[in-house]
Image (cartoon, rainbow, N blue to C red):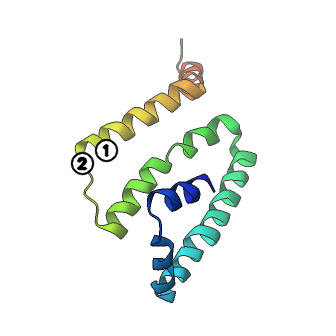
Amino acid sequence: MVLFVIALIQEPGEIAAFAEVPSSFWLAFFFSGMIGTAVGHMLYNYSIGQAGPTKAAIFMNLNTLFSLVAASLILGETITSGHLIGLVLIVIGVLFGSGAAEDLLRKRRKRLPV
């Protein structure tokens, strides 16, 4: 709602452009916004129940990866090395921040013979 109000202030009169948008846009908007979001949240909530919150937090931060891939495939965006470096840093940060890295190291040490 706040973004809508800001848009009305910064671009007065542009709301009329929505009347000229083809119906296929509104269908894609509804499918992406409502259906895609609903399915995504249902799958995420299911995964939290199956994997636990710590492991689910790791996958939540992979949204960046899915956004990059979708932007490349759908919008024709170019994925640069900066994007990939940022993605790697995010995943590393999540692994260490959530405690998943420590859990993996602990499990690995238990498997190694002493």
Q: Quadrant of residue 85?
A: top left
How far is mark 1 from mark 2, CA to CA? 5 Å
Mark 1 Cα shell of 10 Å, populated few (<14), some (14-19), many (≥20): some
Q: Is residue 39 above or below residue 2?
A: below
Left or right? Give the position of 44 relative to 87. Answer: right
Q: Is residue 11 above or below residue 100?
A: below
The answer to the question of whether label 1 and label 2 lie on touching residues, with beta carbons closer than 8 A, is: yes
Q: Quadrant of residue 36?
A: bottom right
- Viewport quadrant of the N terminus: bottom right
Total labels drawn: 2
* Mark 2 element type: loop
- Viewport quadrant of the C terminus: top right
Q: Amino acid at mark 1?
A: His
* Mark 1 element type: helix
Question: Which residue is disc 2 drawn over?
Answer: 80
* Residue in the picture at 45% in, 57% down: 10
Viewer-side residue, 45 vs 29: 29
Q: Amino acid at mark 2?
A: Thr
State the mark number for residue 101: none
Viewer-side residue, 57 vs 10: 10
Question: Which residue is disc 1 drawn over?
Answer: 83
Residue 14 position in % (x across, y down): 45, 71
* Residue in the picture at 47% in, 71% down: 13
Left or right? Give the position of 44 relative to 90. Answer: right
Residue 68 position in % (x across, y down): 38, 54
